[in-house]
Image (cartoon, rainbow, N blue to C red):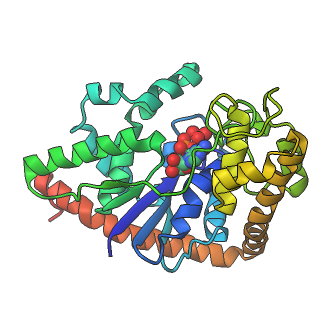
């Protein structure tokens, strides 16, 4: 079976964007591939985090992975920080990555614009840690949104560079772009993507939002004054709501547009809220069940960290040997 690696940062509560763009698709891969689904907590440190909140949220993200349908027996679901090999390989790969390559990363440019008071070295070398995440497990495929394709490209370049210098060491990963899974936009600024770290809570739907909250956020979603339901870039708010609706129901955009064309925006928003609520209900029920079983979750955390470490350490040892670091005698 081919190996798939993917992850999410516990930098906020998982949003409907993360779910429709990533998590939901992951659940469809678990039978066909050997999957590792990581919670990349070291990556989340590139932005200042409140320790207590980070700890709580990290646990919630893991439970939401499982509640969304990822099987912790079939997949390796674990925290990046529990496998020190990620940070160790990242250091080594830093020495095989050029400043010029990292300077071109658009996410660095965007994030350093947003966090002007904290443009740290971790934010700059973020793609190198991501390369280490992927290469440690010899992943063949990496499911990523378009926003991450530049980072995947750098991981490939680093792998090829290393292989050329030291002989075959890393599998060169390919991107895996799912057929369905639109880019979901912010409900408040529909030309920006929906992000879990947005300070404005009305901009995103979190997977654990209650039905009332979902209705309220949908009612407040920014639209336009065209008063016409159509799928066009000129109406980014309505377009986004159609994308959300169709990503959930897997109905075609044309069909949805035709069915809703006679509705006012208010009624349409309620229809969208309804399908979101129904889609999230089973996930939320499972989440609240899992929350009661501390021991079960603790067991998963421990077992999966061990499974991941075993694979990661094999690659790390190989790399250390190739570059000439002395073995323990
Ligand atoms: N709006 C989105 N629509 C579709 N897919 C999305 N993803 C993120 N936002 C959307 C996908 O979700 C996965 C998780 O990515 P991440 O946690 O590593 O970080 P991110 O892409 O930076 O996600 P956020 O929510 O925007 O987090 P913050 O606010 O911390 O930066 C990825 O597969 C991504 O493509």
Residue at image x 39%, y 43%?
149
Left or right: 182 with respect to 312? right
Residue at image x 61%, y 37%?
193
Measured from the top left, where is residue 194 in percent x and y? 65, 40
Q: Quadrant of the N terminus?
A: bottom left
Left or right: 240 with respect to 88? right
Left or right: 323 with respect to 171? left
Residue at image x 64%, y 73%?
297
Measured from the top left, where is residue 99 in percent x and y? 28, 26
Q: Quadrant of the C terminus?
A: bottom left
Closer to the camera, 235 or 248? 235
Residue at image x 48%, y 57%?
179
Measured from the top left, where is residue 32 in percent x and y? 42, 76
**Quadrant of the image occupied by residue 210:** bottom right
Q: Looking at the image, can residue 69 be seen?
A: yes
Closer to the camera, 326 or 123? 123
Left or right: 135 with respect to 118? left
**Quadrant of the image occupied by residue 317:** bottom left
Closer to the camera, 247 or 176? 247
Quarter of image, ligand 1: top right
Measured from the top left, where is residue 7 in percent x and y? 49, 55
State the count of labels: 0
Q: Looking at the image, can residue 55 be seen?
A: no
Vertical placement of 195 versus 212: above or below? above
């Amino acid at each position: 079976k081919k190996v798939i690696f993917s992850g999410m940062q516990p930098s906020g509560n998982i949003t409907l964007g993360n779910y429709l763009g990533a998590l939901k698709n992951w659940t469809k891969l678990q039978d066909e591939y050997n999957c590792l689904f990581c919670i990349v907590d070291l990556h989340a440190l590139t932005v200042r985090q409140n320790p207590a909140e980070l700890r709580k949220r990290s646990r919630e993200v893991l439970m939401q992975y499982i509640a969304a349908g990822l099987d912790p027996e079939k997949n390796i679901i674990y925290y990046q920080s529990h496998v020190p090999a990620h940070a160790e390989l990242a250091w080594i790969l830093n020495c095989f990555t050029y400043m010029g390559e990292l300077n071109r990363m658009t996410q660095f440019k965007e994030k350093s614009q947003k966090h002007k008071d904290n443009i740290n070295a971790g934010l700059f070398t973020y793609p190198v840690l991501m390369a280490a995440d992927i290469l440690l497990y010899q992943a063949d495929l990496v499911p990523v949104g378009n926003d991450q394709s530049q980072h995947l490209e750098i991981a490939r370049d680093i792998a090829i560079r290393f292989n050329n210098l030291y002989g075959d060491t890393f599998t060169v990963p390919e991107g895996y772009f799912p057929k369905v899974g639109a880019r979901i936009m912010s409900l408040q600024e529909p030309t920006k993507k929906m992000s879990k770290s947005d300070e404005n809570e009305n901009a995103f739907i979190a997977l654990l939002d209650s039905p009332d909250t979902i209705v309220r956020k949908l009612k407040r979603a920014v639209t336009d004054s065209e008063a016409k339901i159509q799928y066009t870039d000129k109406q980014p708010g309505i377009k986004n709501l159609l994308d959300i609706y169709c990503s959930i129901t897997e109905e075609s955009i044309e069909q949805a547009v035709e069915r809703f064309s006679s509705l006012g925006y208010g009624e349409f928003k309620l229809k969208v809220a309804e399908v979101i609520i129904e889609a999230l209900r089973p996930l939320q029920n499972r989440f609240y069940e899992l929350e009661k079983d501390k021991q079960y979750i603790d067991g998963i955390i421990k077992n999966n960290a061990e499974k991941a470490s075993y694979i990661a350490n094999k690659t790390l040892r190989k790399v250390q040997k190739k570059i000439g670091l002395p073995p323990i005698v």
